[in-house]
Amino acid sequence: MRTHITPEQITLWLSKRDTYAWARKYDAAWPGSTIAGKSLMAVFDDNGLVYIAINGMADGEVDGGEFNAITSDFLRAELPEDHCLHFVTVGQFQSNEADT
């Protein structure tokens, strides 16, 4: 995984190995993954997703729920909670344990 984080934009690159391992995590596997074993590049700004490429192709199709889960899982550890894009990329996908 690689990231490029600026105040206005976040770029995330996941390797084929990253996506394969994520989809097969012991405690949270993603059966039927459409991303596993594929490289992924995503760019976000304050409006949300700006650009996505799967295996280098901009027109690659991907399940939206899986895309949100994998990108927020990887960015959670990289992006400070006070970054202006935290909610767009991570926060809106986190469960609020106080509500349960």
Image: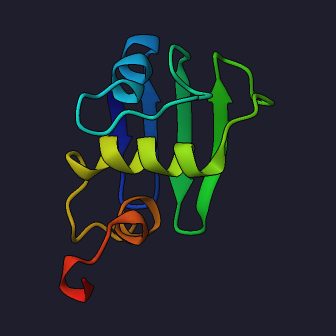
Depth order, front residue of 32/47 = 32
Q: How many labels does the image show?
A: 0
Image height of 13 relative to 16, above or below:
below
Image height of 79 relative to 85, above or below:
above
Left/right of residue 52 with respect to residue 77 in the rendered view:
right
Q: Position of residue 97 (x, y in %)?
A: 21, 77
Q: Give the residue at x 51% y 21%.
A: 36
Q: Give the residue at x 36% y 51%.
A: 6
Q: Position of residue 78 (x, y in %)?
A: 23, 45
**Outermost residue toward the right?**
59
Depth order, front residue of 14/84 = 14
Q: Give the residue at x 37% y 33%.
A: 29
Left/right of residue 70 with respect to residue 95 in the rendered view:
right
Q: Position of residue 73 (x, y in %)?
A: 33, 46
| Picture quadrant where residue 91 is located | bottom left
Image height of 69 relative to 12, above or below:
below
| Picture quadrant where residue 59 is located | top right
Q: Where is residue 51 in the image (x, y as percent from the top left)?
A: 66, 43
Left/right of residue 87 with respect to residue 59 in the rendered view:
left
Q: Give the residue at x 43% y 59%.
A: 89
Q: Which quadrant is home to the N terminus?
A: top left
| Picture quadrant where residue 84 is located | bottom left
Q: Which quadrant is home to the C terminus?
A: bottom left
